[in-house]
Image: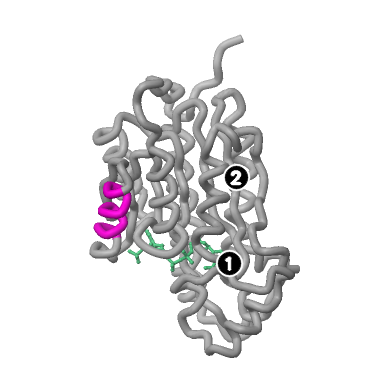
Amino acid sequence: MPIPTSPAGTAAPARSSAAPRVAVVTGGSRGIGRRTVGRLAADGYAVVVGYAGNRAEAEAAVKEAVAGGGGAIAVRADVADEHAVVALFDAAEAEFGGVDAVVHTAGRMHLGPIAELDLAVLDDLHRTNIRGTFAVVQQAARRVRPGGAIVTFSTSVLGLAFPGYGAYAASKGAVEALTLILARELRGRDVTANTVAPGPTATDMFLDGKNEETVARLAAQPPLERLGSTADIAEVVAFLASPAGHWINGQVIRANGGIV
Ligand SMILES: NC(=O)c1ccc[n+]([C@@H]2O[C@H](COP(=O)([O-])OP(=O)(O)OC[C@H]3O[C@@H](n4cnc5c(N)ncnc54)[C@H](OP(=O)(O)O)[C@@H]3O)[C@@H](O)[C@H]2O)c1
């Protein structure tokens, strides 16, 4: 039976066993993505740090990864711009010889009641979170080498259904749907696709615009009685991307300290 090929017509060539594994991390300049860059570098990955505009933070992420012993470069790419995403993956292949893990953390959040939300804000949010995810996983589906992993990001708020999160949660529902279908479309390629859905995690995205009382209330909700840290989430990603996590496929991992 012939080996199924990628949409581009050829499966990505296998990695030579001597070469380091290569990861593309979108949103690698800050928050969960930034921590993931360091975590994967510590595992020996060469890392491509994707970012939107925050060059100084992306360069700092590269420095940290290189200090940890890995190779790393920073590439600016708006994830919703398909040409920029192609260039991001081209850079990974040109610099490091291929792609083994794609960790797509880049995302945005805007809160507001459904009755009041400006539809221009909705379009803007969905451009990054849905179109951006589609553009990134489309390249990932074409290029990740056998044995590799694709990890996208949703949110535990899909289950929590907090008021005010309608537009954001809707965009992440799309990410979950897309990732599950991608896992099935990758049949025969030996590449996994999973979504990590964190609960409240101490990053700019979560903390910006919230007062101390709101942060404390949300931090108290999980049975583990604290906010998630970027390290908590980076560990989950590192496992999913590793050979040890390869049997997990087509899943949504709600990494949230048990919040319900
Ligand atoms: N923090 C939480 O509580 C939480 C909970 C559930 C799910 N999540 C999800 O986890 C993921 C990471 O969140 P975070 O808290 O780490 O966010 P964050 O601290 O706000 O960082 C967002 C990252 O995404 C990048 N980014 C934003 N828009 C982009 C675009 N259009 N193109 C390319 N890069 C873009 C930013 O780049 P620049 O630095 O260049 O701006 C930054 O590196 C997101 O998908 C988020 O929805 C977070």
Most foreground residue, 219 or 179: 219
Quadrant in which the N terminus appears: top right
Residue type at the position of mark 2: Asn
| x and y, in percent, of residue 37 in the image | 39, 51
Query: Closer to the N terminus: mark 2 or mark 1?
Result: 2
Label 2 Cα neighbours within 10 Å, binned few <14 / some 14-19 / many ≥20: many
Which circle, 2 or 1, is nearer the viewer?
A: 1
Q: Residue furthest top?
A: 1
Residue underneath mark 1: 228
Identify the residue at image location x=60%, y=61%: 198
Quadrant in which the C terminus appears: bottom right
The answer to whether 77 is drawn above or below residue 141 in the figure is below
In the image, taking residue 258 as reference, residue 192 lies left or right, namely left
Check disc 2 and report its element: helix, strand or loop: strand
Identify the residue at image location x=56%, y=26%: 190
**Mark 2 and mark 1: Cα distance apart in space:** 19 Å
In the image, the segment drawn in magenta is 58-67
Residue type at the position of mark 1: Gly
Q: Is mark 1 within 8 Å of ligand 1?
A: yes
| x and y, in percent, of residue 152 in the image | 53, 50
- In the drawing, what numbered circle is on residue 194? 2
Identify the residue at image location x=24%, y=64%: 56
| x and y, in percent, of residue 223 in the image | 74, 70
